Image (cartoon, rainbow, N blue to C red):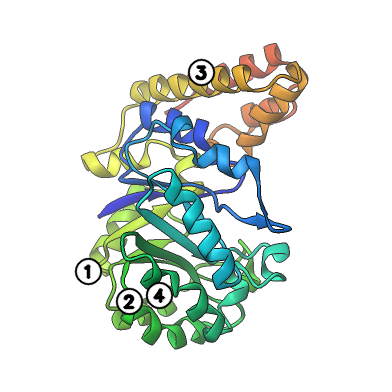
Amino acid sequence: MELLMAPLQGFTEANVRNAFEESFGGITEYYTPFIRLEKGQFRNKDLKDADPANNRVGHLIPQIIAADEDEAVRLVEKVAEWGYREVDINMGCPFLPMVRKGRGAGILPHPDKVARVLSVTDRYPEIQFSVKMRLGWDSAEESLVLLDLLNELPLRQITLHPRLGIQQYKGTCTSEAFSRFYELCRKPLVYNGDISSLSALQELETKYPRIKGVMIGRGLLTTPWLAAEYQEQKPWTSDRKRTAFRNFHQKLLSAYTEKIEGGEQQLLGKMVSFWEYLLANEDRKCLKKIRKAKNLSTYCQAVNELIAGLH
C-alpha cells in the first residue's frame, strides 16, 4: 500500500514536511493543508505553504476547499500557475466555520453542489484530481448517494475518512460504513483515520486487499517512524528512533528560528504547539515539561530528556 501524509492545519506545514522526509521518510505523497479563499482573496499563509520554492519533498499535492464551482476554478488555476498537475479536493473538513460556508463536510448532504465543485475535473483534463471526504455530515448514506457521481468522474483516487462530520475528531471510525463504500467504489480508494501502529496497517492490508493506500495524519506525529517501519516491514530500533527524531527536531527548530522574527517566546510558542500530537504516546512527565516550558533552554532540556527515553 502507498502511505500518504494527511494535511493537518497548523501541523503538517512545509517545514514539518521537509524535516519529516529528510529524517523519517516512507511517505509516497504529501498533501498541503487546504488552500481556501477568504472574502474572495487567497491567504498568503496558504500560498507560501504550497509554493514549490518552500517545499523539498519528493511528491507534494496541493489540497483545495471550495463551496462552489467559481471558488474551485480560482483555486485550481492558482496552483496550476506553479506547475502542479495534481489537485486534491477537500470534502471532509468538519471545522464549523468551513461547514457553515458549505465547504468540506458541509457540502456532502448536497449532491448538486458537490457535482458543481467537481465539474473542474472535466474542465481541466490536464490535471489529475482526487477527493478527500468523510462518510457524510450526519449520515453515512450521504457518501453512498454520491458514489454514482464519483464513480463516473475522472478521479485518480478517493480518500475516505470513516467518520461523520458531526463527530468532529471524536468517537471511533466506522469500519462497517467504510466496507460498504469500499465494495461499491470503482475508483482507487485510500483509507484515512486513527492509524498509528504497524499492526493496524497490516490489518487494513489484509481486510481490504484492493485498497490503494492509507493516509495518516496524527499517527505520523505520534509515531513518526511508522511509515518507514511499514515500508521495511520491521520495527525500528530505539537508537534509530532517537537519531531520526533528534535530527527531525533540530531541522524543525532551525527552520522556525530562521522564519520567526518575534523573539524567543514566539518561537517557543510555535515549537510547543506541535507537541499536541508529537510523540503523544511517550513519557507523560517529559511531555508535560515540554508543554509547560517557559524558555527555550528549559524546552530543549525537556525535549532531550524525552528523546533519551525513546524505546
Looking at the image, tell me whether mark 3 or mark 1 is earlier in sequence order: 1
Tell me the residue at 53%/36% (across/down): 279
Real-space CA distance between mark 3 and mark 1, rounded to the nearest whole angstrom: 39 Å
Tell me which numbered mark, 2 or 3, is placed earlier along the sequence: 2
> Do the residues bearing badges 3 and 1 touch, measured as CB atoms within 8 Å?
no
Q: Amino acid at mark 2?
A: Tyr
Q: Residues within 10 Å of mark 1 (few under 14, many from 20)?
A: some
Which x, y percent locates residue 1? 25, 55
Tell which circle, 4 or 3, labels the residue nearer the N-terminal end. Answer: 4
Residue 99, position as x, y percentages in the image: 67, 69
Name the residue at 57% across, 20% down: 253
Dot 1 and dot 2 residues touching (CB under 8 Å) = yes
Q: Is residue 2 left or right of residue 252?
A: left
Q: Position of residue 250 (x, y in %)?
A: 51, 18
Give the secondary structure at mark 3. helix
In this view of the protein, can residue 111 be seen by the observer? Answer: yes
| Residue annotated with mark 2 | 182
Residue that numbered label 1 is attached to: 210
**Of helix, strand and loop, which one carries label 1?**
loop
Q: Earlier in the sequence, mark 1 or mark 4?
A: 4
Q: Which residue is mark 3?
A: 250
Question: Could you tell me residue 300's position as x and y percent?
Answer: 62, 16
Q: Amino acid at mark 4?
A: Phe
Q: Is residue 20 left or right of residue 102?
A: left
Mark 2 and mark 4: span between their CA atoms?
6 Å
**Farthest top residue in view:** 297
Q: Quick one: label 1 or label 2, which is nearer the N terminus?
A: 2
The tag on residue 178 is 4
Q: Residues within 10 Å of mark 2 (few under 14, many from 20)?
A: some
The disc placed on residue 294 is none
- Asked whether the beta carbons under mark 2 and mark 4 sit within 8 Å of each other, the answer is yes
